[in-house]
Structures are given as structure tokens and as C-alpha cells.
Image (cartoon, rainbow, N blue to C red):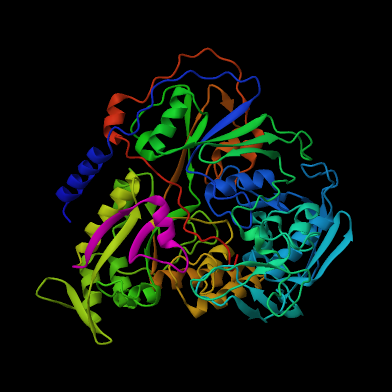
Amino acid sequence: MKHGKLLACMLAFLFLVGGLGYLPNRAVAQDEEKVFKVGVLGDLESLNPILAWTEFAWQLIPLIYEPLVRWNISGGGDWRIVPGMAESWEWADNGTQVTLHLVQNATWHDGTPFTSADVNWTLFTWTWLGWWISSQSHTDHHAIQVIDDYTIALNFVDWGLPNQWRWDGVNDTTPFRWYRGDYNGTPTEIAREYFLMTIPYLPIFPMHLWDQLMWSSPDPGTGINAGGHGYYNYTGPGQSTPWVATSFFHNNTWKDAISWGVLDYTWAEPRIGTGPFMFDEWIPGESVRLVADEDYHYGRVNIDALEFITYSTVETMTQGVVVGDIDFCSTSVTFTELTDFGPTVDVIENDFMGYRMLFINQYEDYLNASGAYNGRGGSKYNALLENDVRKAIHQSLDKSRIADVAYLGTARAADSPIHDSLIWHNDAMVEFTPGAAAAIATLEGAGWQVNSAGLWEKDLGGYNETLSFDLKYVAGDPIAFVEAQLLEEDIEATGIAITTVPVEASTFVSDMTEGTWNYALATDFWTQLGDPNHYIWYLRSDGGLNPNNIEIPRIDELFKEQQLESDYTARKALVDEFQQIVYDDSSIIPLVYYQDVEIYRSDRWEFRPQDLTWTSGIFSVHNHAGWMNVDAAEATTTTPPPPLPVEMIVIVAGAAVAIVVIVAVVWFKRK
């Protein structure tokens, strides 16, 4: 595709969506209490940490619940671990045990004292269920030792999840029962950093509220919504799966002793934690309100409440900050690079802990038009299983141009799923020769030939395939739109035909869901944590968030090996190997590392300087300190801010619908 075509597409996009975003001035309410209002896109799916998966939900959950330890990345720092519900800890010399000393003055939001019994219950439940496997796979469920009310010891083994029949609560084509039998109780030294860096993502639950709903309900006959013991009775494909109550743990149908009611989105889970904020109200589609915990054990926060207000577009949300309806939101470089918000609005820019990437589907049912896709019609896409085809696509991409054009120069080319600001990034990646000529040479060397229609073709298993694919992206996101056009232009320069397909955000999430994978090529963003363990887990063949059905046995091996390697240099070599494997495989192609952009009303509020430079910004699953320390600014006299300039409205024309999409699945199976 030529530059003229790209320009025409961009202009057409602007005309199509123009006029959707202008929001006129409205009066600013003067609340007596200090309420910090945050604009968000879309609604929550759940505040149940077992089910929640969007960035929005996981922004709130660590403020309500609290993990044993937290990350500290203030100032874009080194991801140090700081106390959470554990105020200190020490390791056995041989690295097979950690003893955690818990805070002694904490209470749950209902006033019940927090003790080591809550930690024991949470960690045992997660190891029993096999959820949060990326952090709990070596915690021995047989040997969690409660020493006293505020001291607990965890012992680590080769593999700590119990041998048991497991129940699969998802009504799909996979077996409803399966046996997990890989427990190995051999005491094992683990990588201490891996364990500490992964448990901040694991909230501690109040045993006194959750236990009766999950393990020992006093009323087992009331069914799923009340949390009674029971199971779904599978009666066959396409049939209903009625709930059957049972009053005992072990029978020949139900062996994991858990009420699967916790996996029901309609279940009203207890929203009681020990965090700095308490849940107050959720009006679906409108707002969520948290209020300060007056008795928070690390000291009451400065503000009285946090309110998260739902918007439909980035443009109207950004305008909400400018006119004073809200105090803060994430926004787009489309706005921050092309306009001046004036003295009342400050811009926060930090590295986003993640990247944009191009997914190449590896799900054989989709590529073969078989299984759930039987009878789909159209072409088969088995060519995408060919490494040389994926390599050629990778070679064709001009990532620096994408960074400069789509991100207005605020991004940089990416080469790895491990962010380049982290110590774990492979700085010695062996990369392909880039460019269209190199990509064409790769295809020719693999036996592909250009047919009379100008398309590459080759016989694959008796079926003549051509290299012609759809490329899906989230509709309404101006950056994704430009990025998709640039990808189309780059890939088509090699003779591979590309059709860009905008997809509504919720449909896009569904298409990308594990077990569905309804796409040939797709572009989206991905978040990550400071330790590489989580991302290796995502890309295991049995990973809970596998984005494209990638199956590489060596990645499965590396997942465990790097967890058990206590020497940093040796572990770094294993992580480097993982990154090179992903690069060479090229079914997941990192495109750019980019900036997280946020704006806030600096005439009303003050953040500590160190909280403004957190990796991924204020609105982030990593950052709790910003919300804990923000305070009202000293009163000043300012002129009411104007709306966005008319020329800005014309430029962006309502195009900035940057829906927050995290490619994930509801963690029913292997969370």
C-alpha cells in the first residue's frame, strides 16, 4: 500500500468518526469531602480477584485487597519489593523455606482482625485449585506452617500442587474432569526473586467470609448462588448443566472440594479486604466508588474517596479533565502532542510496562477450518504454521517507522516480550535481516512461488495455499488504525496480501480469547510484570493466557527451570534463551515499546514527585502509592479552563477511542 492510500484511509477514518467527541463546559461540583475522580473507559467485568482480568479491575483490586508484598517502582525504579501484609521475611540458608512476619495491627474492612490463618487459607486454596500457578507452583500445600497468629512459613518443593481429580467449570469441548498427578514433595531451592516478584499479584482473602462460601458452607442445599457445595452436572454437548448440591467433599463426580459458585459472574462475592480503600458502590456502566479506610494499618490515605467514572471515548474523557468534570484520566499522544491544555492540567508520561505486538495465530482448528471452525469456508491458513512465512512477515516490518508515525515519535522499536527497561531484557538478541528484499528471499528459499495473480502460493499437504490474510485491530483507536495501515503497507511490499479489519472492542476480546483465537493476524497491546516468570507462563503450551496457541516444548521447560535457578547469571541466561526462542518463532512479534500518557488537574491535586514517575504511570496495576499519597492542592485562583481547541477537535475528530483491551481469558481453567 502506498503513502497516498494510507493518507486517504486516515482522512476517511477522521470523516467517519468526526463530531462524536465534543463535550461543552459544565459546572464543577464543589464537594465537601475530598473526592478524586478518575475517568475510565468501559465497565468492570468483576471485582472478584478469581474472575477479574481487565486493567480497570486490577487497578481497583489491590486498593481493596492487599498482597503479602508490593512492588516499588517509584521513579521508574528497580522493582524492589516492599512490605504489604508481610512487614518482613527471611529465607532459610538453603532457599527451600521463607518465613513471613505479618503486620499485627491490621483488620479487615468489617473489623475482624487479620491473622496468619487468612494467609494460610488463601495460599492453600490457590495451591489446591492450581490458580495463580505462575507464583504458587512450588509452594507445598502439605507444608504451609502457621507458627503463630502473625508468623507463617512456606516450604518449597519440586512441584507443590496436589494430586487430585479436578473439575473444569467451563462448559466447552474439553473434559469436565481430569486428573492432576504431578505433585513432587522433594524440598527444592527456588529463585527467591521469582517468588517475591510474583506474589504482589496475589491478594489475601478474609478466611472468615470466603471459607464458608467455598469449602464449608453451613447450608449445602441452597445451590450455586449461595455458595453451597456442589457441581455442574454435565449432561452432554449443547445440553444444560444443572447445579447439583452435595453435602460432602468427595464423591465420584466432584473431587476438588470447592464450590464453583465463585466462578459465577453474578455471584456477589464479599468485597472486604485490608487495603487502604473500602468498596462503597458500583453502578454498572456508570461509576465505581471506593472510600478511605479510617483504620488502615499503614495510615489513612489523604483523600476521602476515589470515584471511577465511565466514559465511552478517550476524547470525551480527556475533555472531562479539561473542563473539570473529572480530575484524572489516561489519554492518547494524539492529544498531548498536538495541543496545550493550559496551566490547570499537567501531563504525565512514563514507559508503559508492556508493548504493542503482532499476533500470528497458531490455533490449528482455525487455520485448518476444522473443529469449531468446520464449515467456515474460505481459505485455509496453514501457511502461518510455517516458520519461514512468519519469519518473512517479521522481516518485512519497519518497527521504527511505526514508532515514529503511529506514536508521533514517542515510542521505540521492540524486539522482545521482556521490556527493554528491565534487567531481564536480552540485549544481545540475534535478529533477522530486515526489509522486503530479505523477506522475499526467505519465501523463495522455502519454495514459495508467485502465481499469475501475483500472490505467493505453495502446496501444503495437498492444498494449494496462498499468502493472503486478514489483520484485525480494535476499531475506534486512532493509533491502532494507523499502526494497522503501516503493517499492511510493510507486509504487502513482500507480496503477501493483507486486508485490515477493524473489530469492535468487546468482539475483539472474544476473538482473541483462549480456545477461540478467531483471527489470522491481529495487533494489540500486552502488559507485563517486572519479573519474566509471568510472561513465560503466558506462553507455555498450557498457559492460562496463551494469546495464540503457541506451543513450544522448550518454553514449557524454561518455565520451571528459571523458577528453580537461584543464581542470577544462570537464570538470566535461561530468560535470554526464552526471548530468543520467541523472536525466532515469530508468531508473537513485539512491535514497539511506548509511553503511558495521563493527564490530571494540577490546580486541584498534588502528587508526590516520585509517584509521577512510576513505570506505567498512576493508573496501573503496579502503582498503589499514587492513590495513597495524592492530596488536595493549596487553593489558588485560576481562570476556568477552555474546552479543547476547535482545531484539535477537527484534527482528532473523535477518533481517540482507545478501549483498554488486555488479551486474556476468564481464568476458569488454569489461573
Which image quadrant is residue 597 in? Answer: top left
Q: Is residue 503 above or below residue 307?
A: below
Image position, residue 393 (x, y; %): 29, 67
Which span is picked out in magenta? 495-523
Residue at the spot 39% in from the left edge and 56% down from the top edge: 508
Foreground residue among 367 and 428:
367
Image position, residue 468 (x, y; %): 23, 68
Which image quadrant is residue 283 in? Answer: top right
Residue at the spot 44% in from the left edge and 23% down from the top edge: 323
Residue 205 shown left or right of residue 76 in the figure: right
Which image quadrant is residue 471 in? Answer: bottom left
Give the mark count: 0
Q: Is residue 49 above or below residue 182?
A: above
Image position, residue 421 (x, y; %): 50, 53
Quarter of the C terminus within the rendering: bottom right
66 in the magenta segment: no
Foreground residue among 61 and 417:
61
* Extreme-bottom residue of the structure: 462
